Amino acid sequence: DTAVSQTPKYLVTQMGNDKSIKCEQNLGHDTMYWYKQDSKKFLKIMFSYNNKELIINETVPNRFSPKSPDKAHLNLHINSLELGDSAVYFCASSQQPGQGVEKLFFGSGTQLSVL
Amino acid sequence: AQSVAQPEDQVNVAEGNPLTVKCTYSVSGNPYLFWYVQYPNRGLQFLLKYITGDNLVKGSYGFEAEFNKSQTSFHLKKPSALVSDSALYFCAVRPHGSSNTGKLIFGQGTTLQVKP
């Protein structure tokens, strides 16, 4: 069973379109994240949710809107896609932070290509 | 600014030889340090972490890392490399003041190439 699963694996779309990436974890974790990995493999946090509550928003453009319907799901919706949004987006989860356990479990990534 | 640096884009080593992947950090307060590995077309996987205690930390797949406070380093090591260790390795630090967020700052990654 996949612990952190995200769909789709590949997403090719035109500039200006709106798209969503879905993420689900079956680990019973309280906290979920979205990370962006650019073409140089640089990895940066975008958002973090703890029990459906937003706790990190790293100055991401407001075209990006995360939604957490429950603590097992964290979806990422992107409006008006731009060329610079092309990247690999990783979902991750962990036990509740602040308890000394920062072991993140990552999904296998969604490669977004904006044409 | 709190940061992590991995000075080598790529490390090449022959199978059976020891390997070292370097990491230095800059944080205020006591650092929480991590190593993750990314295999092609996969998400990152946790290897090991240093929180406190013994400076030599052992992790998955025979890897270990040595915390050196005076040199602000946390180098990843393995006594005998395997071809299957070839992957992208990330050092990460939990920035000071983020204990309740789970936020990690990642280095730029080092590609390890182990040749038979």
Image (cartoon, coloured by chain):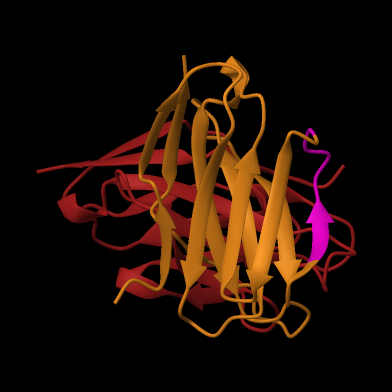
Q: Which chain is orange?
A: A
Q: Nearer the viewer, residue B76 or A68?
A: A68
Identity of the residue drawn at 54% across and 30% down: A38
Identify whether B114 is placed above or below B44: above
- Residue A56: within the magenta? yes
Picture quadrant of residue A64: top right
Q: Nearer the viewer, residue A50 or B1?
A: A50
Picture quadrant of residue A71: bottom right
Q: Which chain is red?
A: B
- Residue B4: within the magenta? no
Identify whether A53 is placed above or below B25: below
B45 relative position to A85: left or right: left
Identity of the residue drawn at 31% across and 50% down: B39
Magenta region, residue range: A54-61
Identify whether A19 is placed above or below A1: above
Identity of the residue drawn at 83% across and 73% down: B100
Q: Nearer the viewer, residue A26 or B47?
A: A26
Residue B6 visible in the shown view: no
Residue B86 visible in the shown view: yes
Residue B22 position in % (x across, y down)? 52, 46
> In the rendered image, which quarter contains the N terminus of chain B?
top right
